[in-house]
């Protein structure tokens, strides 16, 4: 038998009822999206420019409800995102490809604010792979390099980055990047090098296999110099030589735009990471999308092989 809600004001009671109704509506929407007759049109609408104004109004209400629920549980310490879908967003919205990339850059600034608001101390993004460098056209790469320079410059000058004491670093085979990008990296890293409250990592000219190869080469060189014995080579020796050796392994990896693969991202580090895939293209990624990924993380039981 259910006990009466004694002592609750009418406002609090209505708030509880609205919260319960919202959860039921969320569950119904997720169930409907399992069917292609709903998911395909929903995906097209969600990634269209027409959806932006509507989403901006409704997302705030839904996001606030999700945020309250998230704060009641344990949040991940390290979130990583594979930012995919800039070009598909542009194509769906009948925009130029470079405009799609520009929207993606602006989206990263928004997501950074959301991560800082939740006080998640480590945030890593996959911005440019070694495969991108070899496969994309020179014209597209030059446009991307310009975006990286402007984005890193904006970060180094952003008052919020400094007030929140966010340290910025870039990892990868940075020697493959043009000098203007490397200089922007040096400025952003130098202007935030004294900070330690948050660590924002950008993976540029990055490949997970290449990172492992570089680490193994360092181990082999150390062994050849007599610095370490063959018997002492273990996972710790490899880990301390990774580009991300100053980071904890990601707790949660999010990939946007519907692809359900890792694409050579942090292969060594994500052995026990939780993975979350969403159909939304990166420029259309909303606060609610982030919160849903975090909520999914909180519902999972992490066993680490136990």
Image (tube, grey):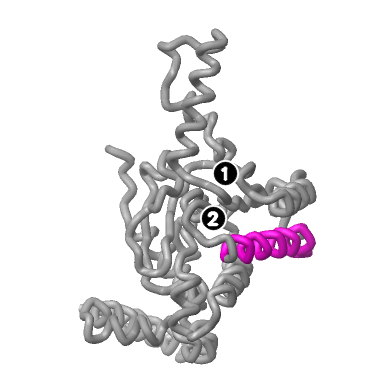
Count neighbours of disc 2 (C-alpha within 10 A) and say few if under 14, some if 14 to 19, many if 20 or more: many
Report whether residue 228 is seen.
yes
81 sits to left or right of 18: right
For the residues bearing labels 2 and 1, Cβ distance under 8 angstroms: yes
Q: Residues within 10 Å of mark 1 (few under 14, many from 20)?
A: many
The answer to whether 48 appears left or right of 189 in the picture is left
Percent coordinates x, y for residue 178 in the rendering? 68, 51
Q: In x, y percent, where is residue 94?
A: 49, 86
Q: Is residue 97 shown above or below 210?
A: below
What residue do we see at 76% from left, 64% from top?
A: 158
Dominant SS of magenta comes to helix
Q: Which mark is residue 104?
A: none
State which quarter of the image contains the N terminus: bottom left
**SS class of the residue under badge 2?**
loop
The disc placed on residue 172 is: 1
Residue at left 44%, top 74%?
A: 88
Comparing 257 with 250, the one in front is: 257
Real-space CA distance between mark 2 and mark 1, rounded to the nearest whole angstrom:
9 Å
Q: SS of the residue at dot 1?
A: loop
Rendering quarter of residue 266: top left
Between residues 17 and 292, which one lies in front from this camera angle? Answer: 292
Q: Is residue 21 magenta?
A: no
Q: On the rendered structure, is 25 left or right of 168?
A: left
Image quarter (top left, top right, bottom left or bottom right) of the C terminus: top left
Earlier residue among tags 2 and 1: 2
Q: Mark 2 highlights which residue?
A: 128
User: Is 143 within the magenta?
Assistant: yes
The span shown in magenta is: 140-162
The one of 95 and 233 positioned closer to us in this rendering: 95
């Amino acid at each position: 038998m259910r006990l009466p809600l004694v002592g609750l004001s009418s406002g609090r009671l209505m708030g509880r009822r609205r919260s319960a109704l919202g959860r039921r509506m969320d569950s119904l929407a997720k169930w409907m999206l399992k069917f292609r007759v709903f998911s395909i049109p929903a995906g097209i609408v969600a990634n269209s420019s027409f959806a932006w104004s509507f989403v901006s109004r409704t997302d705030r209400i839904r996001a606030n409800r999700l945020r309250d629920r998230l704060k009641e549980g344990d949040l991940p310490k390290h979130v990583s995102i594979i930012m995919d879908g800039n070009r598909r967003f542009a194509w769906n919205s009948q925009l130029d490809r470079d405009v799609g990339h520009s929207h993606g850059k602006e989206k990263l600034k928004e997501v950074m604010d959301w991560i800082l608001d939740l006080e998640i101390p480590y945030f890593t993004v996959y911005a440019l792979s070694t495969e991108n460098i070899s496969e994309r056209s020179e014209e597209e790469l030059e446009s991307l390099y310009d975006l990286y320079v402007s984005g890193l410059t904006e970060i180094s000058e952003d008052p919020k980055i400094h007030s929140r004491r966010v340290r910025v670093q870039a990892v990868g085979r940075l020697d493959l990047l043009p000098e203007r990008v490397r200089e922007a990296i040096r400025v952003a890293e130098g202007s935030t090098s004294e900070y330690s409250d948050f660590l924002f990592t950008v993976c540029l000219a990055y490949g997970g296999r290449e990172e492992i190869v570089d680490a193994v080469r360092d181990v082999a060189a150390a062994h050849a110099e007599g610095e370490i014995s063959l018997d002492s080579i273990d996972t710790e020796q490899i880990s301390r030589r990774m580009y991300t050796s100053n980071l904890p392994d990601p707790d949660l990896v999010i990939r946007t735009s519907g692809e359900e693969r890792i694409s050579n991202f942090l292969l060594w580090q994500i052995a026990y990471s939780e993975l979350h895939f969403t159909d939304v293209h990166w420029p259309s990624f909303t606060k609610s999308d982030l919160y849903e990924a975090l909520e999914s993380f909180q519902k999972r039981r992490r066993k680490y092989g136990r």
